[in-house]
Amino acid sequence: MTNTIRVRFAPSPTGYLHVGGARTALFNWLFARQHNGAFILRIEDTDRKRYEPEAVGNILESLRWLGLEWDEGPEVGGDYGPYFQSQRLDLYQKYAQQLIDSGHAYRCYCSPERLGQTREERRRRGEPNLGYDRHCRYLTARERDEYEAQGIVTVVRLKVPLEGQTSFHDVLHGDITVDNASLDDLVLLKSDGYPTYHLANVVDDHLMEISHIMRADEWLPSVPKHVLLYDAFGWEIPVYAHLPVILAPTGKGKLSKRHGGVAVHEFRREGYLPEAMVNFLALVGWAYDDKTEFFTCQELIERFDLEGVSKSPAAFSYDKLEWMNGVYIRQLTQDDLYERLLPFLAGGLGVEESELREREETREIVPLIQERVKKLTDAVELVDFFFVDRISCDPALLVGKKMTAAESLAALRKARGTLAALPNFDEETLEEALRALVEELGLKARQLFGIIRVAATGKKVAPPLFGTLSVLGRERVLKRLDYAEQALEGVVGP
């Protein structure tokens, strides 16, 4: 094995990329970039029953959206390919046979029915280890020949030592030792010729010269089996670092769909920024110190270290992610935010992006909402009234706080007259005139402004009033106030 840092992210395409997998990929990527090493993407697609073809594209697209470009792997290539395990079957079969020839593995002829019956009998006897009973491990050459003559399709099992212990070191969990008697003779090569995770993982990590294995700590119990395989092959064992599991926001149980979005593409669709996602995920199970929360990508590369990763499970806070995303949105330039908002506005409003680009107000609304959106999807509900000819208005909402419908109608008529007479329709002029009208009418600002806001936007909550009116323009504002006046007249009467 070389002295070069080589790490890998090896997802199984049985579903879309989970944020837990993305966090694992991020830690590997940061470690590789910090040490000028290589980040390898390997697709472990040997579970053909659960394989989802569309998941591969989702994984690649999600990683690229996060900015986690790989140095070797699908669509990139490299000297250690192929990078799909389904294209490496001959290698696994070759090394499985090598283990048989060296006496470290054997062929198992047991049918699924026999395995089930044996397991049930052992359960009835109260035996603690319900793993394989090693029946085929002790077959004579003649018995094996008889099975072979029957054309039975076999699996290949590892011949685990019956005595002694297996030890290994994990960067986060320290030294771990297990009794070999607690391990069963696991399957390495299945009857369909595909490898199990254990064989493929060890063979590929060795052949791809992986120096450090960083993966979820749910795989920690498999390490003793992998160590036995490395020893059987006579290969050097990589450095292990098993990362803490991501828990639900409550801290109880693993993060799952019932808590909200869990796939990376769902967060992308909801309007989270990739740089906010990367910053947030880096802090799920890792900390630079007890106070720093915001990092640029380059700062993460410079400061990330395995010693800062906790071995305890980490909770996923949707609230914190949303807050952090809002901070990132407020830091964007208006031009950048405009470009990022366009696809969300187009999708939410049901129009083409090209149409939005042609409308002047699309760019003008950006500074009005930048301080208010926490996700890009928030913008649609805030600004949809800009893009319709006529809004629907509930007359009840047009009645000011602690005012009658008649009083609200009178205030609305005065406001319409004031706005119609203004020499200019810019924010400063609008604010000066309407605040003067508040004094004249003896109202509170929130009373008059609330009536005008509902009349102009159809909403009680909208972007800042004076900027909104200015972007809408005099003609549209007056027309909407006329509609609102008619609505209130229907309540008050002639």
Image (tube, rainbow, N blue to C red):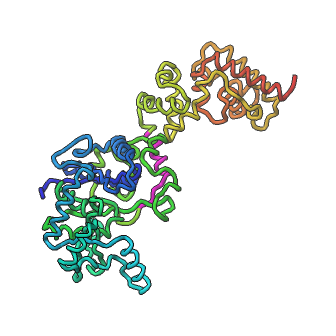
- Compare residues 455 and 82 and report the one nearer the observer: 82
Q: Is residue 343 left or right of residue 309?
A: right
The answer to whether residue 302 is visible is no
Query: At 27% from the left edge and 57% from the top edge, which residue is drawn?
Result: 305
Which residue appears at 57% of the width and 30% of the height? 383
Q: Position of residue 423 (x, y in %)?
A: 62, 12
What residue range appears in magenta?
Answer: 314-328
Above or below — where is 84 with respect to 176? above
Query: Residue 406's x, y, as percent?
Result: 83, 28
In the image, 308 versus 410, the foreground residue is 308
Q: Nearer the viewer, residue 451 or 392?
A: 392
Looking at the magenta stretch, what is its main secondary structure? helix
Quadrant that contains the N terminus: bottom left
Residue 66 location in percent, x, y?
A: 35, 43
Q: Is residue 406 left or right of residue 148?
A: right
Magenta includes 316? yes
> Can residue 23 be found in the magenta stretch?
no
Q: Residue furthest bottom?
A: 125
| Left or right position of 356 against 293 | right
Residue 354 lies, in percent from the top left, at: 47, 22
